Amino acid sequence: MAGQNRNVAYDLSLFEPKPLERQEQKSNIVELPKEQLEKNRKNKVSPLRMIATFFVMAALVGVVTTIVYSQVQLTELTDQVNAAAKQLEESESVYTQLKMKSDYQFSLQTVETYAKDTLGMKKINQNQVVCISLSEGDKGEVLQESCCDWVSSVWNWLQNLVS
């Protein structure tokens, strides 16, 4: 008996391939009652749903097109603004250059030199100055038409009083 127990520990028949048992093939067909068949069938596409889907898709395409068009316009306007800014900077630079040139050409010293050398002019002397005085009797007056209307005279008196 001792030998039999020893063989049980080393039972190699457990590692031998077992003969394939044939299982019955089950049918993959499932039978459903008519109620569930009707329920699972594909519904026909309704024309109203097709029209609604078409209009929703058309609206989406319109929105996307509008967004793209707006972005294109925004890009073009940004380019125009940048070009105008660049032109403004160049114009300001040219203006500064011309202003400096003009200030140099028309400085007081340049004008004096031109007047003396080219035109033959001289600076003013004290003997060239003539003072004019007015006599006491000369003065300017503002003449107003006299109003005969008493309402106008009262109105003028009130205006003079307020001012």
Image: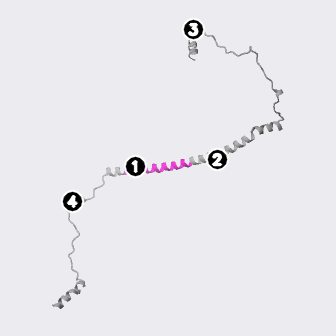
Identify whether 21 is placed above or below 151. Answer: below
Q: Where residue 150 is drawn, which disc sits there?
A: 3
Question: Start and end of the magenta stretch?
Answer: 54-79
**Residue 132 position within the rendered picture, expressed as x and y whole percent measured from the top left:** 78, 21
Task: Kindly report the distance in space between the C-alpha atoms of the residues bearing marks 3 and 4.
Answer: 112 Å
Q: Within the magenta stretch, is there residue 64?
A: yes
Residue 136 falls left or right of residue 3: right
Q: Secondary structure at mark 4?
A: helix
Mark found first going from the N terminus, 1 or 4: 4
* x then y, percent, for residue 65: 45, 50
Q: Are marks 3 and 1 in contact (CB under 8 Å)?
A: no
Q: Is residue 118 visible?
A: no
| Sequence-wise first label, 3 or 4 | 4
- Element carrying mark 1: helix
- Name the magenta segment's main secondary structure: helix
> Of the residues tagged 3 and 4, which is closer to the observer?
3
The three-letter amino acid code for the residue at tag 1 is Ala
Verify CB contact (< 8 Å) between mark 1 and mark 4.
no
* Mark 3 vs 1, N-terminal side: 1
Instruction: Tell me what residue is drawn at x 77 percent, y 39 percent.
Output: 109
Label annotation for residue 36: 4
Q: Quadrant of the N terminus?
A: bottom left
Name the residue that disc number 2 marks. Answer: 90
Q: Is residue 22 above or below residue 87?
A: below
**CA distance separating discs 4 and 2:** 81 Å
